[in-house]
Image (cartoon, coloured by chain):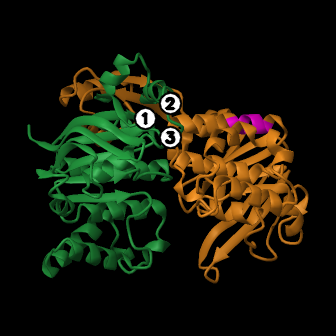
Amino acid sequence: MIQVNELHKTYRNGRVKALNGVSFSVDKGEIFGVIGPDGAGKSTLFRILASLLIPDPGRGKATVGGYDVIRDYRQIRQIIGYMPGRFSLYQDLSVEENLKFFATLFNTTVEENYSLIKDIYGQIEPFKKRRAGALSGGMKQKLALSCALVHRPKVLILDEPTTGVDPVSRREFWDMLGRLRELGITILVSTAYMDEADRCTRVALAREGEFIAIDTPKGITRDYSEVLWSVEGDRMPALLNRLREYPSVKTAFAFGDKHHITVEKGITTEELENYLANNGFKETRVEPIEPTIEDCFLAM
Amino acid sequence: MDKVIEVEGLTKRFGNFTAVDRISFDVKRGEIFGFLGANGAGKTTAIHMLCGLSKPTEGRGSVAGFDITRENEMIKQNIGYMSQKFSLYEDLRVWENIRLFGGIYGLADKVIAKKTEELLERLNFKSERNTMVKALPLGWKQKLAFSIAIFHEPEIVFLDEPTGGVDPAMRRQFWEMIYDAAERGITVFVTTHYMEEAEYCHRVSIMVDGRIDALDSPRNLREAYGAKSMDEVFQQLARKAQRAD
């Protein structure tokens, strides 16, 4: 459904490289996640695929639904739904007016496509007279998704749709994406939440304009090559600093109620526990653990 | 231990709608206090009252020793504030933003100059001195915004979703800056939607429909709710919400 081959995009006469030869493909009915730091080129890529930005000419190629992103931009706009990272609906139009507006742009009506959006639009319909600008963050996301869906797109392009959204609404949002996928809609989504990567069929880890890994979430964690332990105890911030001082500890990061550390091969958990005990950290638990996507991301 | 925030029965109504419903809590000096809740639970309205930007309908409170209703101008001088949405002027350079906020808080030119060097040094930002803020990656922007929010050494800093959209590596660096500030005695009042970040707070409160339904250390909350993670605690509480987001 999406084919990207050696795509480049530079800004400021080539001085800033936003995309540096990105290649990947997304099959119909996939939820393909793009994970990467700010400045990795995620938004640039999504805007090119949405035909809103032209890639560097003469280098690489991208198609969506078989249409070329430069030549066939009119057709592409018919078959995609795009949700930009920044809320870009009309703040002074009501919820209902925004939705009608987008339906009209695509020569369709809200009624015709109500079955597709009712799960999500139903939740904000009680507030349909409210100005879009006066909605809470979670409601704005739901309206933006409804507007992106109202013309029954084949491909949804969602740029960080859940940034600023609370954990309960986030879970609902992803349940919704799962149902859209079952209807055969292809979804390309970027996120800064690592737990969401596990809900994708495949993910790409992006850095500095390149995709450095593309695989299923399981495949990404399977390829992790470090020795990874969790450490749990009292005085967690001080513990983190102490861990970093131990020569065999390569990296140490806070992970909620635990710390995750990577260590040189050959040292044992007992050695580390003894070291910590000798430095005033009694009752510390050190255990080997399986990596999460976030561990893989931090090891990039 | 002295208290930097004391709030009792704080309430805000807009017409028939009770955005914040009789909340009471204290925050101690040097504490990192996580202020959690779903979108629309009333967090931002509560923070506006604490910062002296909005008058409570009922209840009382003090921040940094000043009454939030009568002495709101004094509060503004003694707090720092940053949010995900607004923090810095995009069309000013890094040094100009520092200069501007230093001036707004009434610091002397000499003090600003000296502290600017320290700040750039600490952030490893010397090469970015003349960069327009809009050209900085989000994570850098947020680190700079936080440094500027505590530039005048406030008693307390309010951080409204400071790490939204920031990648995991940068988020961790940001939290290490929060710990440094807390160790220097600055109280940190922070909201976040990342539940693992809730674990980094000394205590957290969870707002549901305008009320504070839970308040304790992350460990005690997990035990009280029989949950493995703060995410589970949050899901249990926030799912009870009646108010539509």
Supply the letter of whichever chain is green: B
Q: Are marks 1 and 2 in contact (CB under 8 Å)?
A: yes
Read off the chain for label 3.
Answer: A
Which residue carries the number 1 mark? B209
Crowdedness near tag 2: few (<14), some (14–19) or many (≥20) residues, C-alpha within 10 Å? few
Which stretch appears magenta?
A: A176-181
Which residue carries the number 2 mark? B242
Crowdedness near tag 3: few (<14), some (14–19) or many (≥20) residues, C-alpha within 10 Å? many
Residue for point 33% across, 45% down: B12
- From the viewer's perspective, is the residue at label 3 or at label 1 nearer? 1
Residue A221 falls left or right of residue B123? right
Quadrant placement of the N terminus of chain B: top left
Within the image, what quadrant is residue A50 found in? bottom right
Q: Secondary structure at mark 3?
A: loop
Q: Foreground residue, B133 or A290?
A: B133
Q: Is residue A112 above or below residue A66?
A: above
Within the image, what quadrant is residue A269 found in? top left
Q: Disc 3 versus disc 1: distance between alpha carbons? A: 14 Å
Q: Foreground residue, A218 or A223?
A: A218
Q: Disc 3 versus disc 2: distance between alpha carbons? A: 15 Å
Q: Is residue B156 above or below residue A220?
A: below
Which residue carries the number 3 mark? A166
Q: Are marks 3 and 1 on the same chain?
A: no
Picture coordinates of residue B184, whole percent (x, y): 16, 51
Q: Secondary structure at mark 2?
A: loop
Read off the chain for label 2.
Answer: B
